[in-house]
């Protein structure tokens, strides 16, 4: 007798053309979100506020009700959905540019208000969809199409550490940074997503996960090289970990 | 102001009348950011909505406020925001999205002086902003223009109805004068039919595939098909919802066209003209989109001159000229910003113009 040990999550649409670049971590992240939606039995009560950037196509993959938000405004739209329908499960899926540059005000204020919303933010240190420009998370020294000699302080200032900032908001119930570079880390990422979803279900506050991801196309790397970069370069500035978890008595501290 | 809920007829400001009417129309969610001369709307809503256990958020910006409205509307809820001029400028991107998403957004826009920060005096300088839009792409907003505090209430009801009936953002375009002015208002029962949103609203994908409310149309062909359909809807709106008021147009030689608070002085000027033997009449568009261009065209066959009276540098006059199409001269009596030109002032200028 055979036992099924692996299947396409019910929360993923079937027969959809895969549109992310080869080796991009978006595919893994979307699958993890779908698995958690399945496991927490949320598909039928979930409403997604999608965003602008490579993340926009998430509604082509997730088989849940979705509203597409203007660039940076996903957290405002999610707030509107949740306040109108508090019984629904409301979440966003955004890139770092959407969440932490053009949408930083919406993100911080949603966390400060303690909105019962869960947010997933993909950090790949660049604007992927537009061809690899400097974004809010671009590392110091990183070459992009708009930092041709590398990010320097004089012209560009510092990258933002998103998970730490969100953890400092008092309305945040859970904030973590995870990565998808190894199987072990993918498992941890899924646990973090689950936690960020559960704090909403329990009505505890804002749930947030920043996912360190690859952009092999714009980084001009193979998928393996890209994951090496996540480990060797990104994690030095963006240290993975749980920055706040009120269910586990872990509070953010100012350092 | 809180007496509004208890009593049917009250003496109140336009801003309170709008807020109270929104409550009575069944507005479930208010999201806003303060700006003079409409801050009373948010103040009133903050108390009442919480008292009624409805949604209220003091948004971090107008960008956030209008997008919260979009989020709420995507679930089929009755939701609104209110703002003014320079801050309505911040909402233009979202209004463009909301027309493409076909969502029943209600925006109350209480005009003040501009451009830029301008001032808090009354103005009609946002006629273009409301009717032509500052957002990208081809779209229309339904625009209702009250001229009395009573109409502020009545047209707020209508704004919710039309927004939901046509799934199109609808603007109640008032001005600082109406917002701040006190008049008696009778709050009638909300008798418009409730619109069934169940075929499109986001409710969770229970027993069906997930719905997507989106404007992203990567293929040009898809966008063409969508826009043709959208403009069919606008044609229906134009055929069914154009509303205006006329006085003295049966035998008029001079046809005034004026909207909002300004039209009240024009109404008096029509009387004064007639006392002086000048056969004047007035058409007051109540819907600025759809604009009563067919009726203006008909009247332009009978009158000798058309004069628009506006508190701006001449905005609606452009739509009037298109409707008149060169049949008769179209003149402008205007004031750039502030209280509308007095009836006496209008009369003097008419005597100059004829």
Image (cartoon, coloured by chain):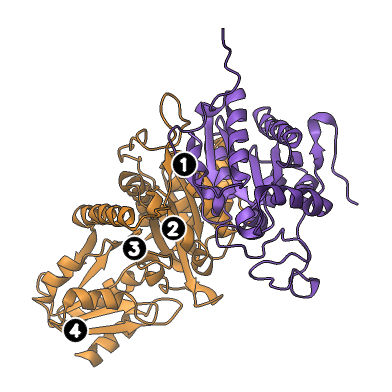
Chain colours: A purple, B orange
Q: Chain of mark 4?
A: B
Mark seen at residue B95: 2
Q: CA distance from mark 3 to mark 2?
A: 12 Å
Dot 4 and dot 2 within a common chain = yes
Front residue of B229/B353: it is B229
| Secondary structure found at label 4 | loop
The residue singled out by tag 4 in the image is B276
The answer to whether residue B129 is above or below residue B172 is below
Please name the residue shown 30% across and 38% down the image: B193
Q: Secondary structure at mark 1?
A: helix
Which quadrant of the structure image shows residue B350? bottom left
| Circle number at residue A173 | none
Give SS at disc 3. Answer: loop
Q: Which residue is mark 1?
A: A60
Q: Is residue A121 left or right of residue B170?
A: right
Is residue A98 at least partly visible in the picture? no
Do the CB atoms of the residues marked 1 and 3 lie less than 8 Å apart? Answer: no
Mark 2, Cα crowd under 10 Å, few <14 / some 14-19 / many 20+, is many
Q: CA distance from mark 4 to mark 3?
A: 46 Å
User: Does the residue at mark 1 contact the one at mark 2 (Cβ under 8 Å)?
Assistant: no
The residue identified by callout 3 is B138
Density class for disc 4 (Cα within 10 Å; few <14, some 14-19, many ≥20) is few
| Residue B198 image offset from top left, x and y in percent | 37, 33
Question: B165 or A246, which is in the foreground?
Answer: A246
Instruction: Please tell me in which quadrant of the rendered image residue B212 appears.
Output: top left
Say left or right for A92 vs B271. right
Residue sitting at 61 percent across and 23 percent down?
A39
Same chain under badges 4 and 3? The reply is yes
């Amino acid at each position: 007798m055979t036992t099924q040990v692996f299947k396409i999550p019910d929360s993923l649409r079937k027969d959809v053309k895969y549109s992310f670049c080869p080796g991009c971590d978006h595919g893994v992240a979307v699958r993890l979100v779908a698995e958690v939606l399945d496991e927490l039995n949320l598909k039928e009560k979930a409403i997604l506020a999608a965003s602008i950037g490579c993340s926009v196509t998430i509604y082509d993959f997730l088989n849940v009700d979705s509203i597409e938000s203007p660039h940076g405004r996903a957290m405002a739209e999610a707030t509107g959905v949740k306040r109108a329908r508090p019984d629904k499960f409301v979440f966003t899926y955004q890139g770092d540019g959407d969440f932490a540059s053009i949408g930083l005000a919406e993100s911080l204020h949603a966390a400060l208000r303690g909105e019962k919303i869960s947010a997933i933010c993909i950090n790949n240190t660049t604007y992927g969809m537009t061809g690899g420009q400097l974004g809010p998370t671009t590392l110091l020294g990183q070459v992009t199409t708009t930092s041709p000699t590398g990010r320097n302080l004089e012209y560009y200032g510092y990258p933002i550490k998103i998970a730490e900032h969100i953890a400092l908001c008092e309305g945040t119930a859970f904030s973590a940074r995870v990565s998808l570079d190894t199987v072990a880390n993918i498992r941890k990422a899924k646990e973090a997503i689950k936690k960020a979803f559960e704090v909403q279900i329990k009505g505890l506050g804002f749930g947030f996960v920043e996912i360190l991801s690859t952009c092999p196309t714009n980084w001009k790397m193979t998928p393996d090289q890209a994951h090496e970069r996540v480990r060797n370069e990104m994690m030095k500035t963006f240290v993975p970990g749980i920055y706040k978890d009120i269910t586990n008595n872990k509070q953010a501290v100012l350092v | 102001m809180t007496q509004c809920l208890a009593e049917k007829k009250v003496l109140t400001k336009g801003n309170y009348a709008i807020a109270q009417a929104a409550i009575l129309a069944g507005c479930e969610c208010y999201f806003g950011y303060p700006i003079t001369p409409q801050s009373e709307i948010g103040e009133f809503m903050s108390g009442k909505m919480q008292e009624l256990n409805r949604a209220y958020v003091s948004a971090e910006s107008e960008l956030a406020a209008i997008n919260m409205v979009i989020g709420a509307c995507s679930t089929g809820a009755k939701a609104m925001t209110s703002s003014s001029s320079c801050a309505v400028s911040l909402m233009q991107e979202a209004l463009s999205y909301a027309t493409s998403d076909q969502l029943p957004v209600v925006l109350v826009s209480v005009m003040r002086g501009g451009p830029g920060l301008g001032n808090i005096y009354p103005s009609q300088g946002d006629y273009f902003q409301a009717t032509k839009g500052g957002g990208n792409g081809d779209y229309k907003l339904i625009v209702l223009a009250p001229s009395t505090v009573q109409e502020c209430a009545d047209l707020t009801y209508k704004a919710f109805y039309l927004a939901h009936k046509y799934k199109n953002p609808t603007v109640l375009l008032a001005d600082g004068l109406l917002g701040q002015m006190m008049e008696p208002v009778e709050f009638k029962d909300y008798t418009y039919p409730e619109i069934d949103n169940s075929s499109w609203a986001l409710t969770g994908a229970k027993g069906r595939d997930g719905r997507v409310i989106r404007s992203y149309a990567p293929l040009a062909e898809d966008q063409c098909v969508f826009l043709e359909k959208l403009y069919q809807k606008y044609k229906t709106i134009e055929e069914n919802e154009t509303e205006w008021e006329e006085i003295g147009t049966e035998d008029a030689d001079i046809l005034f066209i004026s909207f909002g608070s300004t039209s009240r002085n024009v109404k008096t000027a029509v009387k004064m003209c007639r006392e002086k033997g000048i056969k004047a009449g007035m058409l007051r568009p109540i819907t600025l989109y759809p604009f009563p261009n067919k009726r203006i065209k008909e009247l332009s066959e009978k009158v000798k001159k058309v004069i628009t009276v506006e508190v701006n540098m001449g905005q609606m006059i452009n739509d009037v000229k298109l409707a008149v199409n060169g049949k008769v001269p179209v003149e402008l009596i205007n004031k750039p910003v502030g209280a509308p030109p007095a009836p006496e002032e209008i009369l003097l200028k008419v005597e100059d113009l004829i």
